[in-house]
Structures are given as structure tokens and as C-alpha cells.
């Protein structure tokens, strides 16, 4: 049995691997298809939030939403590239603590808020972000 060899052939299109395991009386061929994530997430909603100075408002799926054909909402990660200047984004369980990332699942659970904190007279704030499904990333097109 010391001469047994496992041979591997990788196929580019479609992405798959074939393994050959020859034995003196028997050959076993395993065909294992591998699904590659080639479809990036898609931002489907990115709308303005209106609130009074010094207040907070929940970011709902009606305001910010992304989807992906092969990812669950909890797997779609938002990364804040440029934070808001007149406030911050925070998680419901940690008031007062600015965050730099959250998931679509967090938004669906109504756990993410924008908090206006500025004493200044600015009347419009914004933040830029990207959404990642673990393999592919898209940026906010309103940047």
C-alpha cells in the first residue's frame, strides 16, 4: 500500500476538482464541484434620513438595504469608509459608542442608528460605505 497515490485535477470551467485514487484492483473517481462566489452584493436602497438636531433615528431597511444571491443578511457586512461629520452610527446595545461596521441583519433587526451630535449649524451629514459578502465588495455609488 505504500505505492498508492492520490491524483488531483483542477478544472477551471466549470470550477471543480476530480480526484483519482488508483488501487491494484479498483479505481475510485470522486467528482466534487466547488461553487465560486462570483456575484457581488447589490445595494438596493440608499435613501436619506431626516431627523431633528441632537436626536437619533434608526436606520431601517427602507433607508439602507443590500442583497446578495448567495448570502444571508447576517453575512452581508457594511464597512464605513468615511464616517459622518455631524454625528455617528451606533448599535442599539451600545449607545454613545460609534461603530465602523454592521450587517444587513443588524439593519433588519432595527439595531443600527444614526445619532446627531454636532453643536454646529450643519444641516446635512453623510457617510460612505462598502458592502462585503465575504468574497466580493461593492462601494456606495453616492460617494
Image (cartoon, rainbow, N blue to C red):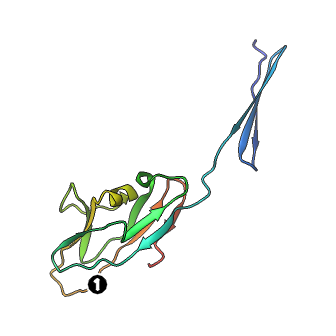
In the image: residue 119, left or right of residue 40: left
Q: Is residue 48 left or right of residue 35?
A: left
**Residue furthest top as drawn:** 1
Residue 18 location, x and y as percent? 75, 35
Count of all numbered marks drawn on residues in the image? 1
The image position of residue 8, as x and y in percent, is 75, 34
The x, y position of residue 72, in whole percent, is 46, 52
Quarter of the figure that contains the C terminus: bottom left
- Name which residue lies at 39% across and 59% down: 104
Please give the name of the residue rendered at 18% of the width and 80% of the height, measured from the top-left corner: 52
Residue that label 1 marks: 124
Q: Could you classify mark 1 by the number of other residues whose Cα lies within 10 Å: few (under 14), some (14-19), or many (20 or more)? A: few
- Above or below, 16 against 131 in this view is above
Mark 1 lies on a secondary structure that is loop
- Whole-percent x, y for residue 117 in the image: 18, 74
Q: Residue furthest front?
A: 62
Q: In the rendered view, would you say 22 is above or below 99?
A: above
Task: Locate residue 114: give its quadrant.
Answer: bottom left
In which quadrant is the N terminus drawn? top right
Residue 82 to residue 34: above or below = below
- Depth check, front residue: 84 or 77: 77
Q: Residue at x 30, y 67 (%)?
A: 59
Amino acid at each position: 500500500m505504500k505505492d498508492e497515490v492520490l491524483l488531483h485535477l483542477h478544472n477551471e470551467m466549470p470550477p471543480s476538482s476530480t480526484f483519482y485514487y488508483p488501487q491494484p484492483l479498483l479505481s475510485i473517481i470522486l467528482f466534487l464541484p466547488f461553487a465560486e462566489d462570483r456575484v457581488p452584493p447589490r445595494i438596493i436602497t440608499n435613501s436619506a434620513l431626516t431627523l431633528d438636531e441632537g436626536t437619533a433615528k434608526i436606520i431601517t431597511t427602507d433607508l439602507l438595504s443590500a442583497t446578495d444571491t448567495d448570502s444571508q443578511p447576517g453575512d452581508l457586512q457594511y464597512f464605513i469608509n468615511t464616517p459622518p461629520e455631524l454625528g455617528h452610527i451606533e448599535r442599539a446595545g451600545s449607545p454613545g459608542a460609534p461603530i465602523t461596521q454592521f450587517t444587513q441583519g443588524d439593519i433588519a433587526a432595527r439595531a443600527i442608528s444614526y445619532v446627531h451630535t454636532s453643536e454646529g449649524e450643519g444641516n446635512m451629514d453623510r457617510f460612505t460605505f462598502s458592502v462585503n459578502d465575504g468574497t466580493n465588495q461593492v462601494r456606495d455609488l453616492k460617494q
